[in-house]
Image (cartoon, rainbow, N blue to C red):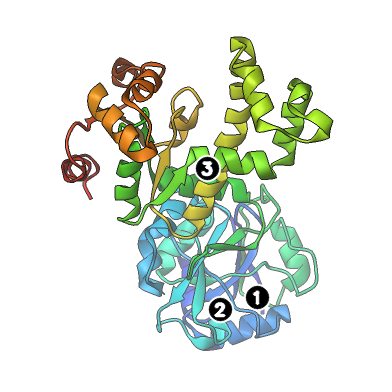
Amino acid sequence: MKTRVFTDKEDLAPAAEMLKGGGLVAVPTETVYGLCVNGLDERAVAALYEAKGRPEVKPLSLMIPGAGAMDRYALDIPPQAYTLSEKFWPGPLTIVLRTKEIIPPITLSGGQTVGLRCPDHPMTLALLEKAGIPLAGPSANPSGRPSPKTAAEVLGYFDGRIDAVLDGGPCGIGRESTIIDMSDVPYRTLRRGALPDSEIDEALLGAMRVIGLTGGSGSGKTTAMKYLVERGALGIDCDEVYHRLLRECRPMLDEIRDRFPDAFPGGVFDRKALGRIVFADGAALTDLNKLTHRYVREEVRRLLRGHARMGGTLAAVDAVELIDGGLGELCSFTVGVVADRKARAARIMAREGIGEEYALSRIDAQKSDEYYERHCDHVLHNDGTREELHALCRELFGI
């Protein structure tokens, strides 16, 4: 067999016909060269395993021309798979999904999932369009040898043993694609490759609907969060996050000790001692807030990323300092919950068993309704019953 070499100036129709006829064709991608066959042709796949010396217990992923082809080969595709494909395809990301029966068992090594990838190289994308078939394409090297980054390296391995090579020049990245399994939750990274996990997590987080809730004592923001949680949202109470970090986050405690050593009598953290320091000194309180807001914000981001990996699409963040603490930047939109001063006092009194004068003094020390009008995307006026607040939530959130 003579291995034909195609350049980017040639018609790729003959290479497409080779693949449709069961041939082996090496192609360039943005990572490394791949050795491809028709992924739906059992005999061609068997020839690919033999050429590479690849154990048949290792499944093959399929190259496809784009996200629009996913539903031809996969079942139960979560919306987050489309989020990632739209963000990173063409590119070095393989998405594993539940397979349709159209793909033969040999391609999948008898498994129930298939990896799909859209390579970022114009020649290979053109070949996929011309061939109209998914291409099984592991790296174009004998198993155990380095992955090739040029057509010459491919020929060094397979000249005379495969039908053709598409010479698209050197591969730019030189690392295999990242593989993420989205056939079940949590979504798991099976192979860390050219695309970092952090970029995947940020894309999933960016597609999530995150509703930021803020307001003063007795306003009803916690009730609004419970409404969302009952409808499937992840609820994050930032006050709870802060107090957990005070118990568990050693780096944050170390920074607090460096700035406020008197809050650690005998080397042990004392919350009341810290309170006495910062509430008597405005500059000290500003320093503490700046320090702790940073840790709370990063912990909230971590919780949201974890929710996204679990397939979550909705979250609610409840924080008094939602705006000033920078948490609003993580949200799709922010909502200030406000209420009449007397209504707020009555709720606080009923909840905490305190007198009206003390309840009103607490309210007067907090941010005004005008603050939320200025800084939030939406404002909910909660002067009525719980049922009336639920109706307002239903109208605003659409759920």
Q: For residue 195, say whether it is visible.
A: no
Count neighbours of disc 1 (C-alpha within 10 A) and say few if under 14, some if 14 to 19, many if 20 or more: many
Residue pictured at 62% horizontal, 11% vertical: 281
Residue pictured at 51% horizontal, 87% vertical: 105
Q: Measure how far apart labels 1 and 2 are at the Cα level.
A: 7 Å
Q: Nearer the viewer, residue 186 or 269?
A: 269
Which residue is the site of mark 3? 240
Q: Quadrant of residue 60?
A: bottom right
Q: Measure how far apart labels 3 and 2 are at the Cα level.
A: 61 Å
Q: Which mark is residue 162?
A: 1
Q: Earlier in the sequence, mark 3 or mark 2?
A: 2
The residue under label 2 is which amino acid type? Gly
Q: Kindly state the secondary structure of the residue where label 2 is placed.
A: loop
Residue 56 pos. (x, y %):
65, 85
Which residue is the site of mark 2? 23
Q: Kindly state the secondary structure of the residue where label 1 is placed.
A: loop
Quadrant of the drawing holding the N terminus: bottom right
Residue 30 pos. (x, y %):
61, 52
Residue 160 pos. (x, y %):
71, 76
Count neighbours of disc 3 (C-alpha within 10 A) and say few if under 14, some if 14 to 19, many if 20 or more: few
